[in-house]
Image: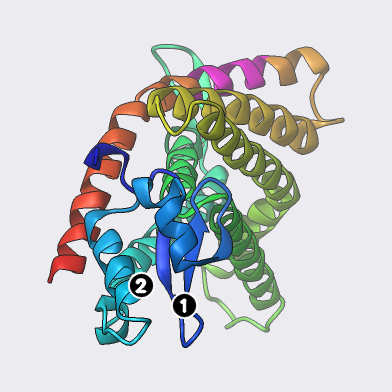
Amino acid sequence: MDSGCDNSKYKLLGFERNKNLAMIMVVATGKLIKVKLDEVLRSEIIDNLSKSEVRDIYRKFYSGGVALTTYELHDRHERSWMVYVVLNLLLLALYIFSNIGATKLVYLEVFDLVVTPGVFLFPLTFLIVDMLNEFYGLRLARKAILFAFVSNALIIILLSAVAYLPGLPGWKLDVPYGAVVAQVSSVLVASSVSFLFSEYVNSYLLSKIKELTNSRFLFLRVFFSTFFAVIIDSFIFCYIAFYGVMTNAEVLSIISVQVAIKMFFAFFNVLPAYGARSLFKRFVTEGQVS
């Protein structure tokens, strides 16, 4: 068995009690299917599972479903879901930072450019979504995107509500707080729409390229999915945020700068993607063995 291909297409999630059924997840889409144990042994699924998963399937099959496996003894996917939670938190943190950081303009004197801090870190969200898609499938990756969007919207709503509460007379931070929250809220619609569209396109393209390449060539799906997502994100955000305030030429100039900076960082997402995949497999495998 080629261990390098383990779980690139399928993952064993558990067994249906008293029915001799295996719960299998299709990695590319996140779809869950129930397959009879004897059918699993005769299909291509068995060739793509890890050695520990194959061992448990054989034990269940030859024991008629009564043998204990790692699924009954403990939650062998605990480490896997902990990674999912961490990636969700990172995605949320970067997304919120990009919105709040938009109130701070950074002037790059060397290039005579004005950008926001989020331009440098926002491309990392595409890497995180790529990793979610790679490890957990399209369905769970899109749920993570939705979680980040809803959480960000809730935080902005709560911050805006606080601005209307009566302040302490003479408190010098009252006015700056209202100004910052107003600025953050003004870009919320633009960032939310661009975030949803770009991340959904990113996750969809990654999933499709993965299917077409038979789970090979990670660098291709990471780069091309990020490439199109970055362009979509910049166009939607800039046109919604600056429509009517700047001329089309000025907006296109800002878009070109944002795309160039984001693509520069996105290009280097390929190496971390390979490293993250390797660490993920090692971390989860150690958890299964222990």
| Location of mark 1 (residue) | 20
Amino acid type indicated by mark 2: Phe
Foreground of the two, 142 or 165: 142
Q: Residue 94, how many percent across, how many down?
A: 46, 51
Q: Is residue 130 magenta?
A: no
Q: Which residue is mark 2?
A: 61
Q: Which residues are magenta?
A: 253-262
The residue type indicated by label 1 comes to: Asn
Q: Quadrant of residue 264?
A: top left
Residue that extends furthest to the right in the rendered view of this protein:
244
Residue 259 within the segment the image draws in magenta: yes
Describe the element under mark 2 as helix, strand or loop. Answer: helix
Q: Residues within 10 Å of mark 2 (few under 14, many from 20)?
A: many
Q: Is residue 72 left or right of residue 112?
A: left
Q: Is residue 121 above or below residue 151?
A: above
- Name the quarter where the C terminus is drawn: bottom left
Closer-to-camera residue (57/132): 57
Quarter residue 232 falls in: top right
Marks 1 & 2, CB-CB < 8 Å contact: yes
* Residue name at image x 41 percent, y 50 percent: 135
Q: Secondary structure at mark 1?
A: loop
Q: Quadrant of the N terminus?
A: top left
The mark that comes first in sequence, 1 or 2, is 1
Question: Marks 1/2: CA distance?
Answer: 7 Å
Q: Residue at x 69, y 52 (%)?
A: 188
